[in-house]
Image (cartoon, rainbow, N blue to C red):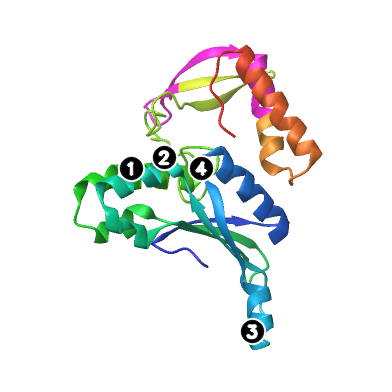
Amino acid sequence: MYERDYAHTRRFEGRTVEQVASRAREALAAEGFGVLTEIDVQATLKKKLGIDKKPYLIFGACNPPLAHRALEAEPAIGVFLPCNVTVFEGDDGAVYVQAIKPEMMFALVANPSVQPIAEEVSYRLVREAGPTNDAGWVPVDRRTLATPRERVYCMLEAGEDLAAFAFGNFFAEPAPEIRLRRVGRAWHLGKVLFEQWWLMPAGLRRRGLELALKAGARAYGVRLAL
C-alpha cells in the first residue's frame, strides 16, 4: 500500500507505533545512526492545526563517519542530511517503517564519489540488522542459494532437529543438488531462537533472546548482526 521507489519499506502487524519506533531506535543505533531529531507529526498537527491524525513519527538519523565522508566529497550535500526514517500507522491498521533511499536522493548530485557512500548508507538503513531487501529479507539466488553479501549464507533445515548452511541448486534436474555445510543441532537451535527473536515484541524476553543468540554466535565463531 505504501511502497515507493524512493523509500525502503517494512510492514508490521500486531504491533503499536511505540513498539516499532522503539525497535527502530535500537536498530539505528546498532548500525551507527544517532537520532538527531524526532518529530511527532500527530501531536504537532493537533497542537498547531487542531487536526486529528494517526500516529506518525519522523526520525532524523545520522551516521557521523558516513556523513563526514559525504561532506568531504560534496560539501553541498548537507542539504540532504540527515536521512529521514518514518514510523506510522497505515490505513490498514498495520505499522510501517520507511527510510529514504540515499542512492536515489544522491543521484541528483553530479558527483560519482558519493555513490558508494549512498549505497553503504542504504545498506545500513534497509533493515536494522543486515543485508536485506525492502521486505526485510536477504535476497537469495534460487539456483545457487548465493546472497549478494560476502559470507552471508542460506540456512536450511535438514530434519531431526538438524540445520546447516546450504549451497547448490534447488531446481536441478532430475533432482535438486544441495550441499550442506556444518550440519548440527546448534544451527537448528540458533535458527529457532532467531525466529523467536524476530517475532518477539520489544521487551525483556526479546532482549534475552538477543543475548542468547549473540552468545551462541561468539561460541561458534559466527558474526551476528541484530
Dots 2, 1 in contact, CB < 8 A:
yes
Of the residues shown, which amino acid type is indicated by label 2? Pro
Q: Residue at x 26, y 52 (%)?
A: 74
Q: Which residue is mark 1?
A: 69
Of the residues shown, which amino acid type is indicated by label 3? Lys
Specify the quadrant of the image occupied by residue 89. Answer: bottom right
Between tags 4 and 3, which lies in front?
3
Specify the quadrant of the image occupied by residue 225. Answer: top right
Q: Which residue is mark 3?
A: 48
Between tags 2 and 4, which lies in front?
2
Residue 137's tag is 4
Dots 3, 1 in contact, CB < 8 A:
no
In the rendered view, would you say 141 is above or below 47? above
Of the residues shown, which amino acid type is indicated by label 4? Trp
Mark 1 residue element = helix
Mark 3 residue element = helix
The location of residue 108, given as percent across then percent down, is: 25, 61
Mark 4 or 3, nearer chain start? 3
Is 185 displayed left or right of 144 in the figure? right
Is 67 displayed left or right of 37 in the figure? left
Residue 65's tag is 2
Give the residue furthest to the right. 204
Dots 2, 4 in contact, CB < 8 A:
no
Residue range highlighted in magenta: 167-192
Q: Residue at x 27, y 47 (%)?
A: 115
